[in-house]
Image (tube, rainbow, N blue to C red):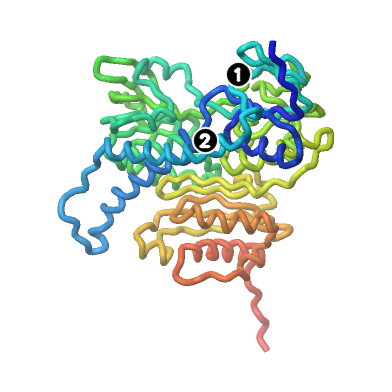
Amino acid sequence: MKQITTEVAVIGAGTAGLAAHHAAVAAGSDAVLVEAGPFGTTCARVGCMPSKLLVAAAEAVHATGRLGTFGIDLPGTPVVDGPAVMARVRRERDRFVSFVISGVDDIPARQRIVGTARFLDDHTLELDGDRRVRFRSAVIATGSSPTVLPFLKAAGDRLIVNDDVFAWTDLPGSVAVFGPGVIGLELGQALHRLGVRVTLFGKGGFVGPITDPEVLDYAYRTFASEFPLHPDADVRALERTDAGVRIDHAAADGAPCSLTVDHVIAATGRTPNLHRLKLRNTSLALDHRGIPLFDRETLRCGHSNIFIAGDVNDDLPLLHEAADEGRIAGDNAARFPQSTGVSRRAPLNVVFSDPQIAIVGRGFADLDPGRTVRGRVSFEDQGRARMILRNRGLLHLYVDADTRRFAGLEMIGPDAEHLAHLAAWALQAGLTVDDMLAMPFYHPVVEEGLRTALRDAREQLDGPPRVRPAA
């Protein structure tokens, strides 16, 4: 039995784990990084980067459909070369992964351990190959994996998870995507625009991460006008056949429908990678899902010497949050038993659909309706949006009625990724609606839509203008 002794053990070499290891070393601790699988991070290999490469290809071909409205004649119909599209996706994906691996290679070899880790107690990890790691403190950063609902397994060899899409060497003829959340919506729309026959199935009526009922309804109508979308589907049967996968479901009016697709893509969420860790051998308190209870500001699990960061804690599964959490957890693990709470950044979530979706703050569902004013703007008649033929969208922003402070927004519309950043900065700075309206707005720009919604909120706060009495 080989024993390794270290001050900080970081389990998982994804975005959060790499950030945690870097922070622990920067704080002066001896730290090791334990990874069971290939290096490269979820974002670079199967997440943010390859998915946006596919979206970019889809946006390029879709843009040609608007040329006629501008008075531009494009001879012939654009032809999507599936193998060429997927070759570029894989080539650029591999380039991004190589950058991550290069960074890992810069870590001293003695600090990198390849193996599957299991807790024996609060200070000991057991690794395959008769190895043990004794540590003073640890960071769990094992990420997450795609969830596959049991009934989808009837698709057999035609069932894939969203990660598998980026191994394709060509585009299929048809797919059914289950889960119109962030991942399913981006992939489904991109594949549709690249010529794949796509049907999206969901449960509960959700589209992306939207919780505002009016914005949600607008999003549903917008996407459903482009491709078949069933956000609360009644799927009655799913079967692998010689022709592919047959799916029987009910239409909106209850009429029976059936379709056959080449592949079923499960985009039904992700599950924290905790099952191999044997957390029951530790003193950690776990919630009903088996996730350790932790402090969001310190990332410390209860009063223990163990910290948790990134997608594995299932709090805000986003790359920038994982990087922040890794840094916080790694620094606190190095300084253990001292733990410093850090104010988290304003929540920011963007979906790279078209129109894009953005949520700033905790979203409509977490607001107190009795204390919240909602400012509104439609992008259908917004000047800049109409000029560039991207005038589909609705933005609702939320203002605290007592303090007049900006509380967040939910939107679907053009340039949502940019508007959301402005809004997130304002939220983190604690600005009021008056502060935001005092900021410069150029003309004509899509950002003027944000100003319209702010003015709407201010008018509601101030009430109707007073009428001066006659002299």
Say which residue appears at 58% left-offset and 55% top-offset: 397
Which of the two residues, 264 or 166, is positioned nearer the viewer here?
166
Q: Residue furthest front?
A: 109
In the picture of the structure, the residue carrying the numbered disc 2 is: 101
Location of residue 31 (image quadrant): top right
Say which residue appears at 74% left-offset and 32% top-offset: 30
* Residue 389 visible, this orientation: yes
Q: Amino acid at mark 1?
A: Thr
The tag earlier along the polypeptide, 2 or 1, is 2
In the rendered view, tell whether residue 179 sits above or below residue 388: above
Q: Amino acid at mark 2?
A: Ile
Neighbor class of circle 1 (other Cα within 10 Å; few <14, some 14-19, many 20+) is some
Say which residue appears at 64% left-offset and 22% top-offset: 289
Residue 320: mark in rendering: none
Neighbor class of circle 2 (other Cα within 10 Å; few <14, some 14-19, many 20+) is some
Which of the two residues, 465 or 349, is positioned nearer the viewer here?
349
Quadrant (top left, top right, bottom left, bottom right) of the C terminus: bottom right
Which of the two residues, 271 or 300, is positioned nearer the viewer here?
300
Quadrant (top left, top right, bottom left, bottom right) of the N terminus: top right
Say which residue appears at 38% left-offset and 19% top-offset: 236
**Which SS class for mark 2?**
helix
**Which SS class for mark 1?**
loop
Query: What percent of the width, then of the height, locates residue 88?
Result: 34, 40
In the rendered view, tell whether residue 255 sits above or below residue 431: above
Q: Residue furthest right?
A: 337
Frontmost of labels 2 and 1 is: 2
* Mark 2 → mark 1, Cα distance in angstroms: 19 Å
In the rendered view, tell whether residue 401 sits above or below residue 197: below
Query: What percent of the width, then of the height, locates residue 295?
Result: 75, 35
In the picture of the structure, the residue carrying the numbered disc 1 is: 116
